[in-house]
Image: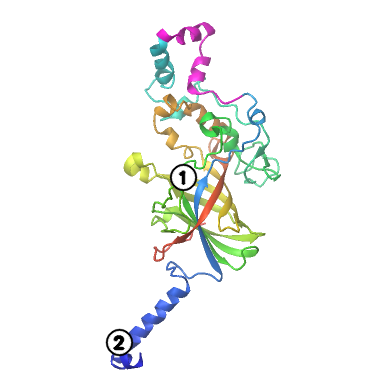
Amino acid sequence: MKRVLSRIPRRTSRTVVGLAVALGLALTVGGNAFRAAPQGQTRTFLIVQSDQGIHYGKFEEDCPQGFEMTVEEAFLATKTPEERERLLRPENAKEYAKGWKDDFITGPGGENVCNNPKSFMNDPKHGPWRGVQSKVSYGMNLDGTPDGRATANTCGHSKFTGVNGEEAVDNQLYRAIGCSKMHRSTAPMAHAYIDPFLVEIRGIDDPINDDHVEVGIYSTDDTPLQGSDGKPLPNQTLSVTRNARWRATGAGRIVNGELTTDVFSSLYLKWVMSTWGLFGQASENEFNDVRFKLTLRPDGTLEGLMAAYRPIDNIFTIGRCCKGTASTANNDCASEHKTLAMLADGYPDPETGQCTKISSASNLKGIPVFIVPGRPELTSRK
């Protein structure tokens, strides 16, 4: 090496040495080019499962009056017994289908219950759902009150007890949709319109107890690789999105292996509906006053809860796409929207006092992955 350098002009040799030092520093921080890593380890996860925080307790306690009415059932409820009997005869099948699949879900201006549910707010044929009646739910105390009383930033509402006995849990989204056939189904759903996203925990000095770590929440522009079982593979390498809006960083602490974050005032995550072309690629989920409680499992996975307020117009974007949601999926978007508006408990409108966002919870599961080095500089935003 000395002989080689002796043949190189002094100015050039200084450049070579400088590049070597720079490369050594880059390798020291693990090739992570967007900023120097804090002291400690970094662990990154891909969230591969999420749900709407529906607690599957005893159905007769959660929904003592049964499931909410479907569009078809709500249509029949507007008819007299004699008219229902007539419409259900085989020879009247065409009239019956047109009645509930077209006339009942279409407004006087041609709007339908899923494209424009707000236009049906005063339509008595599409009443609000009854909602969950039990007292237990996933979630966290988002408003800071013990009883759900109205504050400057919230509307009055009833509280739940947490699944593990936590007090004063807020999850009005579950209260609204927990008895809907479309959302409750017969078993927990792994995905509920939240695309896979990355969780990065930096500066871990002790994975059991650490009073300060940095937490990054990012969408990814990549499509995760899947195994033969259709599930994303662990330990693959993924890139952080180039869209700064879909990235956020904050702080947290680990106590007894559980990570609790500070509040992210806002969080936007990519949501893709490929059949919608460019519009579908640009859609997003919005969360406000977001908190995470995530457990670092011994097997290298991550599991826990995300609680947040969500704008009521942003939650079921996919369900509001078209008339088919009402006529084929048999979901009354007008009743759904009316229920969300009635139970919304966060961010009051300054003029009307009506809350515009609703408390929610999502159960999350993550697998270990790597973040590709050399991604663009991230803008820290809480």
- Is residue 116 on the magenta stretch? no
The magenta span reads 66-91
Query: Which residue is rendered at x = 31% and y = 90% of the image?
Result: 4
Find residue 191 and report its horizontal and vertical position in percent. Answer: 49, 42
What secondary structure predominates along the stretch shown in magenta? helix
SS class of the residue under badge 1? strand
Q: How far apart are marks 2 and 1 (CA)?
A: 52 Å
Q: Which of marks 2 and 1 is in front?
A: 2
- Badge 2 or badge 1: first in the primary sequence: 2
Query: Which residue is rendered at x = 30% and y = 87% of the image?
Result: 12
Query: Which residue is rendered at x = 47% and y = 41% of the image?
Result: 193
Q: Split into 4 quadrants, where in the image is the N terminus?
A: bottom left
Question: Label 1 is placed on what type of residue?
Answer: Asn
Residue closest to the eye, 346 or 53: 53
Q: Which mark is residue 285?
A: 1
Find residue 226 and report its horizontal and vertical position in percent. Answer: 42, 50
Residue closest to the eye, 367 or 74: 367
